[in-house]
């Protein structure tokens, strides 16, 4: 069975709708409300979304792979720059080591410690690959601002794989 999601914004009192057990009465009230909107007697906006073909919602991800990252190379994510250093790292820095797995883990620590980055995504690593995963599901994540890098020694895959969520654009009727 197909599903529709209706969002109606109006100044009319929503308490006229009764308990879920009174479906027929609620349907009649909804028909009357929409009829009033249709003829212009009631001010409202009506947004309709089809939910029948939405895929299961999934989080968008982006990856960074260590290749030959160098001192002072940077990665910028959500406007926040993380810098690779060979000395002791300070805020928004991560330590470069000769081991790709440890360097990737250091980048994860820096990203997860950054207030802006950690509020929007989580970072994890395995075998020298850092994966950033958005905290909000949906296709909208695939269209985020790019992650940038300062070095060709950093392999980067931009945001992808987000599904569901705001995929279907709403049809809006305003009267």
Image (tube, rainbow, N blue to C red):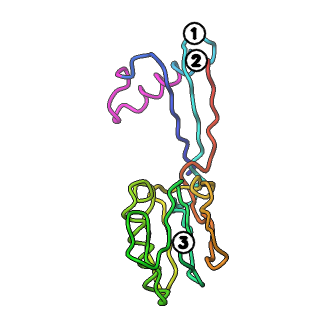
In the rendered structure, which segment of residues is drawn in magenta?
15-31
Q: Nearer the viewer, mark 3 or mark 1?
A: 3
Residue neighbourhood size for the residue with mark 1, other residues' Cα within 10 Å, grouped as few (<14), some (14–19), many (≥20)? few
Between 27 and 4, the one lying in front of the other is: 4
Between 97 and 157, the one lying in front of the other is: 97
Between 122 and 33, the one lying in front of the other is: 122
The residue located at (51%, 19%) in the rendering is: 33
Q: Nearer the viewer, mark 2 or mark 3?
A: 3
Rendering quarter of residue 150: bottom right
Q: Position of residue 144 (x, y in %)?
A: 60, 54
The residue located at (46%, 79%) in the rendering is: 86
- Mark 2 lies on a secondary structure that is helix
Disc 3, disc 1: CB below 8 Å?
A: no
Residue at numbered disc 1? 41
Please report whichever mark, 3 or 1, sits nearer to the chain's N-terminal start: 1
Disc 1, disc 2: CB below 8 Å?
A: yes
Q: CA distance from mark 3 to mark 1?
A: 64 Å
Q: Position of residue 14 (x, y in %)?
A: 39, 22
Disc 2, disc 3: CB below 8 Å?
A: no
Image disc number at residue 160: none
Image disc number at residue 37: 2
Q: CA distance from mark 1 to mark 2?
A: 6 Å
Residue at the farthest front position: 87
User: Against 145, is 86 above or below?
Assistant: below
Residue at numbered disc 3? 72
């Amino acid at each position: 069975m197909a599903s529709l999601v209706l969002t109606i914004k109006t100044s009319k009192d929503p308490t006229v709708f009764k308990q879920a057990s009174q479906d027929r009465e609620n349907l009649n009230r909804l028909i009357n409300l929409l009829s009033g909107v249709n003829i212009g007697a009631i001010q409202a906006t009506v947004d309709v979304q089809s939910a029948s073909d939405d895929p299961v919602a999934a989080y968008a991800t982006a990856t960074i792979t260590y290749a030959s990252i160098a001192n002072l190379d940077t990665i910028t994510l959500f406007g926040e720059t993380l810098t690779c250093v060979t000395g002791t790292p300070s805020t928004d820095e991560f330590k470069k080591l000769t081991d790709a797995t440890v360097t990737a883990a250091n980048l994860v620590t820096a990203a997860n410690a950054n207030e802006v980055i950690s509020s929007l995504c989580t970072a994890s690593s395995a075998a020298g690959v850092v994966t950033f995963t958005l905290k909000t599901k949906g296709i909208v994540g695939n269209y985020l601002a790019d992650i940038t890098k300062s070095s060709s020694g950093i392999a980067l895959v931009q945001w992808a794989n987000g599904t569901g969520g705001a995929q279907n654009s709403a049809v809006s009727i305003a009267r």
